[in-house]
Image (cartoon, rainbow, N blue to C red):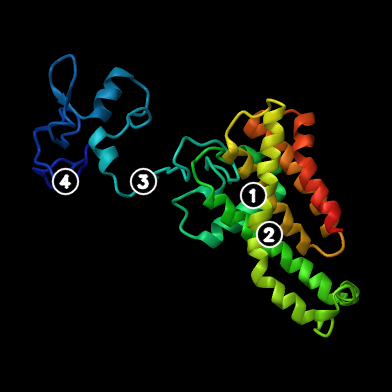
């Protein structure tokens, strides 16, 4: 086991930056103080030779780990620092695995666009996990409001594309308002675009307020108004389904109901009956919109 052919060194063979403290009695390796171990006879030995002495027949390197200093200073091994993307302990999520909250609520996310896309992806493809990963009380209405407006605007893009593909629907609606009947359908749509974010925001507050009042009547609110608002705000992710041709509008109506019911159950602990009652204003607005 001795290193024949090597010139004697006054440096530790395991830590070349340290001066030798002793030489192994068995193999004559130079050892620093941390690497020097002693057997029952009190003689200095390296860890490998001492292991061979204590466990005859076992290869000395099979059971011997490098000294603690060497493990901590070994720069050939990557140091992995697991950082939770949320600020609290995490569970597997959509937030994607490893995140406590949906990416849109993660203040450390490096990209707003990336956070929005990831949140939409989770909301569409993993709805149960999506609602479980929404923080219901943060004293912050602006963050979910912005998400709802963005998701609603993407839904409006799908709606506008559908209207422009069938302009006769707009022309029929214009017959009831002769003052603007001379305008083209495209011009009407373009004039409506600046008002859409405001309409989405106002509608969101209105739906949330009415739903929360109904839940309070049934004593089914496990949280403040912010919880109800966040349920309806993040349920707006369903509007992205308007971008899907043909089936999109039908899927959106079903999916938004599904998300709100699950959100009210997760955020307030509301049962199916209370959730359906809270949904009635939204369903009524959808019926009138048709």
Residue denoted by label 1: 205
Residue position marked by numbered label 3 in the rendering = 79
Marks 4 and 2, the one that precedes in the sequence: 4
Distance in Å between CA atoms under marks 4 and 2: 64 Å
Is 211 left or right of 142, judged from the image as shown?
right
Instruction: Look at the picture and state if 270 lies above or below 138.
Output: above
Graded by Cα atoms within 10 Å as few (under 14), some (14 to 19) or many (20 or more), the crowding at tag 1 reads some
C-alpha gap between disc 1 and disc 2: 14 Å
Badge 4 local density, few (<14 within 10 Å), some, or many (20+)?
Answer: some
**Are the residues flagged by discs 1 and 3 in contact, CB closer than 8 Å?**
no
- How far is the residue under mark 4 from the one under mark 1? 69 Å
What residue is shown at x 75% (from left), y 75% (from top)? 189
At mark 1, the secondary structure is: helix
| Residue at (79% x, 53% y) in the render | 252
Report the residue marked by disc 2. Answer: 152
Dividing the image into 4 quarters, which one contains the N terminus?
Answer: top left
């Amino acid at each position: 086991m001795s290193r024949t052919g090597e010139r004697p060194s006054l440096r530790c063979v395991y830590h070349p930056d340290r001066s030798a403290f002793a030489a192994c009695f068995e193999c004559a390796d130079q050892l620093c103080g941390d690497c020097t171990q002693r057997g029952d006879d009190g003689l200095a030995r390296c860890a490998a030779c001492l292991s061979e002495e204590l466990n005859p027949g076992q290869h000395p390197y099979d059971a011997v780990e490098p000294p603690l200093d060497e493990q901590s200073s070994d720069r050939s091994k990557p140091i992995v620092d697991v950082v939770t993307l949320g600020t609290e302990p995490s569970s597997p999520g959509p937030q994607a695995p490893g995140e406590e909250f949906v990416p849109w609520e993660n203040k450390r996310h490096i990209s707003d666009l990336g956070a929005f896309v990831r949140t939409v992806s989770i909301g569409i493809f993993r709805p149960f996990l999506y609602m479980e990963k929404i923080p219901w009380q943060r004293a912050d209405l602006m963050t979910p409001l912005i998400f709802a407006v963005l998701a609603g605007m993407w839904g409006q893009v799908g709606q506008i594309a559908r209207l422009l593909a069938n302009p006769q629907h707009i022309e029929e609606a214009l017959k009831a308002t002769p003052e603007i009947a001379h305008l083209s359908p495209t011009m009407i749509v373009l004039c409506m675009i600046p008002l859409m974010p405001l309409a989405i925001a106002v509608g969101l507050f209105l739906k949330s307020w009415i739903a929360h009042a109904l839940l309070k009547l049934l004593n089914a609110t496990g949280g403040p108004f912010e919880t109800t608002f966040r349920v309806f705000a993040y349920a707006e992710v369903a509007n992205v389904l308007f971008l899907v041709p043909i089936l999109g509008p039908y899927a959106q109506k079903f999916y938004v109901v599904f998300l709100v019911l699950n959100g009210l159950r997760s955020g307030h602990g509301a049962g199916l009956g209370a959730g359906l009652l809270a949904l009635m204003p939204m369903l009524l607005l959808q019926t009138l919109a048709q």
